[in-house]
Image: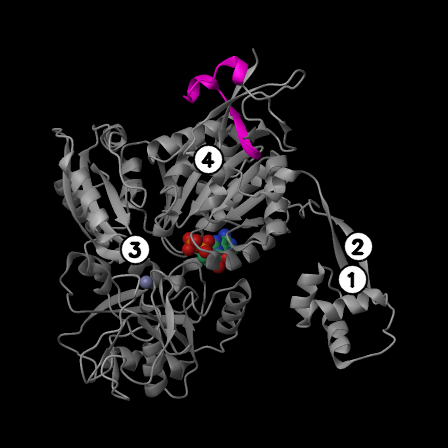
Amino acid sequence: MNRVRLLHFNAALGPLDYRLPEGMDAPPGTVVAAPLGPRQIIGIVWEKERLPADEVPDAKLRPLLGKLPVPPLKESLRRLIEWTADYYCAHPASVARMVLSSGGALKGPATMTEYRLTDQTPERMTPQREAAIDALQGEQATIRELAGIAGVSEGVLRGLVNQGVLEPVEVDCDRPFERARADFHLPSLSPAQREVAERFIGAVSEGKFAPFLLDGVTGSGKTETYFEGIAEALKKGQQVLVLLPEIALTEAFLRRFEDRFGAPPVTWHSSLKSTERRRAWRAIAAGTAQVVVGARSALFLPYANLGLIVVDEAHEVSFKQDDGVRYNARDVAVMRARFEKIPVILASATPALESLQMAEAGIYEKLDLPSRFGGAELPDVETLDLTKEPPARGHWLAPRLVEQLKLRLERGEQSLLFLNRRGYAPLTLCRHCGYRFQCPNCSAWLVEHRLSHRLACHHCGHETATPDKCPECGEPDCLVACGPGVERIADEVAEILPEASVAIATSDTLNSPEKIAHFVGSVEEGAVDVIVGTQLVTKGFHFPELTLVGVVDADLGLEGGDLRAAERTYQQVAQVAGRAGRGEKRGEVIIQTRHPDAPVIAALAAGDRDAFYEAEAEARRHAGAPPFGRWAAIIVSSEDENEAREAARQIGATRPNLPDVQILGPAPAPLSLLRGRYRHRLLINARRSAQLQDVIREWLGSLKFPVGVRVNVDIDPYSFV
Ligand code: ADP
Ligand code: ZN
């Protein structure tokens, strides 16, 4: 009997068995269509012994419908799917969904119709038609895209098609990407860079599992060195994956990549159009996409022939996914490299303690770039004690920082003020009755965005127009903003330096590649004097005329119960400090704080990274925190407050009693209401030796909850809200 087992997207049903029709060959990894009731599902043929299922008698098996026109998933990827599901206590179906993440790609080759201008003129010219023809010179795209480009309705363009002014062109949806060339523009590396690059070249050419931690100060040329590893993979005809923590960083990366390799890489992120997605997916699976730059989801794509993975800014928290499968792309990247038997490079100026520990244990090879390229020096860092040098009333920038801003403006240099808070103010209240604006769906204040005249929740996206009177007492003109956001700091700069041109850089203002490119362009041209930005501007940017960085409130990140708060503050401030003095002029960093003696602030001021990491490691060791112990969280939520509390209580009451596992809670989560769901948390702290995932699976596996209750497991959590 030719029985095959399928992993498919419906996690609730579990794997299903089918009959392999006569003459069909479907080895493990084959992507197939199969019947389920009256419907059709997509599945991946799996090794039967690796995936338990309820065995259906042979006689009842239904036949597979057919194979989909994509290459079978390789064994290395199948093992990665299993490992990810197992490690993060997720269902393999949910991981498989991240692999087969383009519905269009699974349908096979396709063409589509695009349109371009001919040399015909319309019989009757209208202002709209004229504008469209002007705007569409040299363009070729679908009607819908052209309408977007020209800013006219699709109807106007259809009219032009009927008159032969626009002509249809059949294009292959899978047309190949431009080829990158390993030797397009060879760099001249410094001796230190050359040494590091040679290690990467050697490892890629050898082609075995080799994890590297590239630890180089900001501006040391980490990118230049791993580019040489990429070049080696290109020479071998292999693919490379580069993971970046944010799309905002992609812009600068693309330019540098193109300068070095003569063609842009293939990009992968959530805002791709579905046609771009299918094209990228199919090229990746066919092996013709040479270098893929992407967000964390690019990690699960079916590369045909991967030769190297790079995780840049590897310490970044955004590599951790906090919904669906709660994985950490940095860690999964290392596992993927292991299954693929290839090198992986984790690059950072401020590596995570977990990564440093792996290097110390000899598991990762650590490579150092201890100085900036081209003789640029690291900036001077000093603290500014806000309790001794307070800002003027109602202001946030202390006089000494203001003096330095003025000095930069006089010298024609640029400054950057860092505050990790979007919007104008984090809290708005009524001066008359004390009413505070809160999100109806979350236990969180609404953040005022003055530029867009909205109050917004940063957790669920709820928004309302800012009212002109208090919704509670009806008093007009009584609303006061409490605390600063970047917009408020920008206002303050405009007030004290009216002649300065100020740019706000946050995910609200730089929310598209075009806007980012425009921002970078205007800073490079010198059209911006002061940048006020969130963590978005802490990485990647290279502005040689930027000589002053002011950290508006270094204490902000230390509030809240995050176990990595000190490390994150260190990383953020060190990274943003790294934007200063990257050219010929020396940079200066001023850190405003109320706690200049806090170990993390003192270490930043002294430039003593080792002291910080040692103290932090000691504190973690003492607390049994990662990397010395392990954490996991269980988050229980429901739209029904009682149901959520009761489910959490039940989980707490059935807790296992084990010597190497400590369980805290249940307790209401700090964000006790999120998107309309009430939330409770348990936190598990285990020794490294404990079989943490098995313990959790066994514990939760025996419990039954009402349908409205969700129980999420977060292994190695980064978020504690
Ligand atoms: P990091 O990623 O370590 O912060 P980058 O790779 O961004 O450093 O390099 C910092 C700056 O120095 C960039 O503008 C880069 O182009 C330049 N640079 C670094 N190494 C070289 C080199 N060997 N030749 C020319 N420019 C270099
Ligand atoms: Zn909300």
The quarter of the picture where residue 620 lies is top left
Mark 1 or 3, nearer chain start: 1
| SS type, badge 4 | loop
State how far apart marks 1 and 3 are (Cα): 49 Å
Question: What residue span does the magenta drawing correspond to?
Answer: 37-60
Q: How crowded is mark 3: few (under 14 residues within 10 Å), some or many (20 or more)?
A: many
Mark 1: amino acid: Arg
Mark 2 or 1, nearer chain start: 1
State how far apart marks 2 and 3 are (Cα): 51 Å
Q: Name the residue under label 2.
A: 169
Q: Which mark is residue 571?
A: 3
State how far apart marks 2 and 1 are (Cα): 7 Å
Q: Mark 3 or mark 4, which is nearer to you?
A: 4
- Please say if 438 is above or below 127: above
Mark 3 or 4, nearer chain start: 4
Q: Residues within 10 Å of mark 2 (few under 14, many from 20)?
A: some
In this view, the residue in front, 591 or 190, is 591
Residue contact between numbered discs 2 and 1, judged by CB atoms under 8 Å = yes
Residue at 44% x, 32% y: name it.
81
Residue contact between numbered discs 4 and 2, judged by CB atoms under 8 Å = no
Q: Name the residue under label 4.
A: 10
In this view, the residue in front, 267 or 698, is 698
Q: Mark 1 points at which residue?
A: 116
